[in-house]
Image (cartoon, helix red, strand yellow):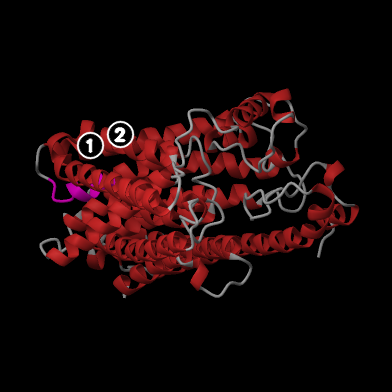
Amino acid sequence: MYSVFAHLILALSFCIVLFADFIPSYAGSYADQRLCLSLLLVALVSLGVFRVSRPQIKTAALSDVWPFFPFIFILCLSVFAYPQGEFFLVEPVFYSLYVLTFGLTGFVIRAQSRSNETANALVLIALISCFFYAMITVMVYLFAVTDNFSQLDQMIPWGFVNIRYWSHIATWVVPLFPLALIVLPWSGNRLWRVGVTITAALWWWVLLLSSSRGSIIGLLAGAILVWIFFGRAALPWVKLFTRFLIYGLVAWLLLSVVIPGVVFESVEVRGIKGHSSGRLPLWLEAFSMSLQNFPFGMGPQSWLTHDVLTDAYQNSKKFAHPHNMYLMWAAEYGWIAIAALAFLCGVVLKRLWARIKVVRSGENECAPYLIALTASVTAAVVHGGVSAVFLAPGSMLIGLCVLSVFWAFVRPETAELNGKQLAFKSTYGRYSGLILTLAMASASSFWFCEVLKYRRAMADDLTYYGQEVSLGQLPRFWLHGYYPRPDGQMPDETLGVLTKPD
């Protein structure tokens, strides 16, 4: 039953992200992904609480997930400290549920001794999904070439609102490709090896074609760091990662330079920019915001509603986030939230270092998983410093899968948490766990209702926004993310919606 559930969740996450164009849409792919992610958080956090509320593992669960609590507490505290309209609680509760979900899910995976099995399922589904995405990409490429459309980067990658959202997915999944040839049982099959190699090469080609600097830098940083820290144990993964990168360069030369050079009169290659692409004014504005109410920030969604502080941002293009997740959290939730996040990362590094020492000694069968997952998470954390990796719903769906499995590997599996010891042994334990689960399910369901109300209000605002404000799509929580806005840019009836109870 567990295996079916895990495969279903993973398959759903990858399909709704990579193949949104082929799935009937309810509210548009971006909103569908956000709703799917929100529902998944409600379901997994409720199931996780139910699982760990059993007396036999409650203490172990608390000792495992307690580093998440400072960050969650600070975000939830901002809900009460800055009550700004009807939807101010959506985002802080969203991030709180997100980190709690992958913490609890990772613990439950480890407690059931399912780490390797779940990791294999993640790698298998990621590889199959990325393979079919790559094959369709080749079809799109051939259609573009035969139609004499030379600006390939405008059609590839396909299926995403913005190519940067595709690069977020690449940041999470590219480090997993070597695992398909290291741990999966078909690694000796020649056809399987060819399929994995083609998939990896084509994904690297699209990364290079779209000049996704943040993703490329994050991936290289992750590869270098795992090589440094894991040493010789990381060599099999590093060799395959490097080989796939070289194949990707060859594919780029062939598909982006040679073939277009033969078909078209001139070759149009998207260059890698050496500037900040307009991000510097956003970062300066976010940093200035973080100092206004130091160290507590200006409150949830204040990036959307605050009065502009710096001339550079006043005169630059507006976005719904500052293209830096850490500065956005510092601006809205304060440097105290960043300190709590740094504390969480410190605990992760401490636990991970203990695992690294075992891996370096050659005594850990989980080494390939730990290496690849560490590279993936490191790449995402680095990429998050220049992009909305932890804001875009597609990225967060895939990230939830990777982070949950990563957290399962951060500590070794222990026999004390296995098998029958997970069973209830008392009536008190049975009912206390049920009550706690119902309370969490009710609270998270109430939050999901707020998410739905937020989406309806955003949809109702589209007409006024398009006619009076007209800044284009500015994705944040929803695709049209510039809502709420400063009072001067909001219609009277929308302001009424913000304060009027149902």
Name the residue at 53% across, 55% down: 393
Q: Position of residue 247 (x, y in %)?
A: 24, 48
Q: Residues within 10 Å of mark 1 (few under 14, many from 20)?
A: few
Q: Quadrant of the C terminus?
A: bottom right
Query: Secondary structure beneath disc 2?
Result: helix
Residue 50 seen in this snapshot:
no
Q: Which residue is at the far right?
A: 492
Q: Nearer the viewer, residue 458 or 311?
A: 311
Work out whether 164 lies above or below 49: above
Whether label 2 touches label 1, CB < 8 Å: yes
Q: Nearer the viewer, residue 21 or 121?
A: 21
The residue tagged 2 is 350
Q: Nearer the viewer, residue 492 or 337?
A: 492
The residue tagged 1 is 354
Q: Position of residue 212 (x, y in %)?
A: 44, 42
Work out whether 143 lies above or below 329: below
Query: Secondary structure beneath disc 1?
Result: helix
In this picture, which residue range is highlighted in magenta? 364-373
Q: Which residue is at the far front?
A: 265
Q: Position of residue 75 (x, y in %)?
A: 59, 42
Q: Quadrant of the N terminus?
A: bottom left
Left or right of 221 on screen, residue 240: left
Name the residue at 55% across, 34% down: 337
Q: Marks 2 and 1, Cα distance to the nearest angstrom?
A: 7 Å
Q: Nearer the viewer, residue 210 or 407?
A: 210
Q: Is residue 123 magenta?
A: no
Give the amino acid at mark 1.
Ala
Left or right of 196 on screen, residue 269: right
Give the amino acid at mark 2.
Lys
